[in-house]
Image (cartoon, rainbow, N blue to C red):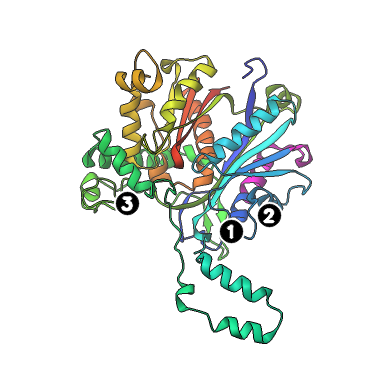
Amino acid sequence: MSTTDRIVVVSGARTPFVRARTVFSKMSASALGGITLRETVARSGIDPKLIDEVYMGIVSAPAEGSNIARESLFDSGLPPTIPCTTINRYCASSAESVAGIVAKIEAGQIEIGIAGGVESISSIRALFSQQATDFFSDIAKMKTTSQKLNHVMKFKPAFLAPNAPGITEATTGLSMGQSADLMARQFGVGRQEQDEYAVLSHQKAAKGWEDGFFKSHVIGVPTKDGTLIDRDTDIRSDTSVEKLSKLRPVFYKDGTITAGNASPLTDGASAVMLMKESKAKELGLTPIAAIRSVAAAAVDILKEPLLIGPVYAIPRALKAAGLGWNDIGLFEIHEAFAGQVLSTFRAIESDSFAKEKLGLSSKIGTIDPSKTNPHGGSIPLGHPFGATGTRMVLQTAYGLKARNAQFGLISICAASGLGAVLVIEAI
């Protein structure tokens, strides 16, 4: 990636992240996405007609408008002539949106693009079986009343039993939480350690709001009943290890993952505007940060822990950025589960993992807690799947400024054994 004419973030915004089926339950994914697109453009101050393309990530796209990037654009009021693409790379979807826009700018295909993501868990609907779908589809095809009546006689009440939405790997048959619980066991991460990590993350996120850090990029969203939601709703500043220790394991009776040390199901959206540094200068814009490098990795989930992918991508991202582990002043690690984060730390600090799995001579590095998720992560902030990547880009960009650090590394694990890593540079 060029270091002479860097690709920079010039503006961005995110909604508050809220627990699913609460204050954003009446807002569609496109409405949330549209708000962040509109605000990202407004904050840049540029003519919307200059925007060449929009990429947005989502994991659970609504059936009535599965190209959520396009639907969000319509809701935003921005010019309908802007091409839009929707990306699903699970929890790394909006990180891949950033990578896609960066690649198009580097290739000279576009000059200005917006990358973002959205998730409305509140809007996910239950599905019906294939047998029920076929039954009702057959009725629609029949032309005579007698044919339809004869077919209706074949109806079974069981057809109406819904398949509740869930997060299960088709390949392994395990839920994300089950896989994370097994991962924690493999890396020797205990329950108390996970609860302690979760409490600390909540405390850091609460302090981030108290100090005004999040006001730099989190915007207020009015709900249909006129209430202004201007803060993440799941942060618990008063939580404690004692409180979390009373929660029962969710996935296995002898497991360690609970509702308290895992990220909640969340609604929210985020977006960033990207262009070359020379273009920003031409438009009179002051960049927030630059994208130094991006990398992706995948593992065989029948042989490796589901959420270990980022560890394989970190060396690639550092090499592409021309940096070493000790050059990084800020680490933003996605917290799907405390057990997953701590397992990732174990792998990063393991000489044997580095040699046997990564082909390195020694461990990737040593975790410095003071440099890691200083404003909290997905456990307290929430995790709207498609929006987390660009949330982390914004949080890293503004976090580098707050800490007067030069380089930040973003690590995101994703379903099906995927990992995404970005290196961000302060400007």
Compared across the picture, whether 239 is left or right of 93 comes to left
Residue beneath disc 3 = 259
Q: Locate the C terminus by quadrant.
A: top right
Q: Position of residue 400 (x, y in %)?
A: 49, 26
Tag 3 or tag 1, which sits nearer the N-term? 1
* Residue 258 drawn above or below residue 138: above
Please tell me how crowded label 2 is: few (under 14), some (14-19), or many (20+) other residues with Cα within 10 Å: some
Q: Residue at x 33, y 27 (%)?
A: 347
Three-letter amino acid code of the residue under disc 2: Asp
- Asked whether the residues under the numbered discs 1 and 2 touch, taking CB atoms below 8 Å apart as contact, a structural biologist would say yes
Name the disc covering residue 111, or none.
Answer: none
Q: CA distance from mark 1 to mark 2?
A: 10 Å
Q: CA distance from mark 1 to mark 3?
A: 25 Å
Pick the quarter of the image with the N terminus: top right
Between the residue at mark 2 and the residue at mark 3, the CA separation in whole angstroms equals: 34 Å
- Can you tell which quarter of the image residue 274 is in? top right
Frontmost residue, 328 versus 129? 129
Residue at 45%, 49% in the rendered image: 232
The residue that label 1 is drawn on is: 28
**Is the stretch drawn in magenta largely helix, strand or loop?**
helix
Answer left or right for 207 relative to 248: right
Secondary structure of the residue carrying numbered label 1: loop
Relative to residue 162, is residue 101 depicted above or below? above
| Residue 48 is covered by the magenta coloring | yes
Residue 426 spot, x, y in % from top left: 54, 23
Q: Which residues are magenta?
A: 35-52
Does any portion of residue 199 appear in the rendered image? no
Discs 2/3, front: 3
Tags 1 and 3 touching, CB below 8 Å: no
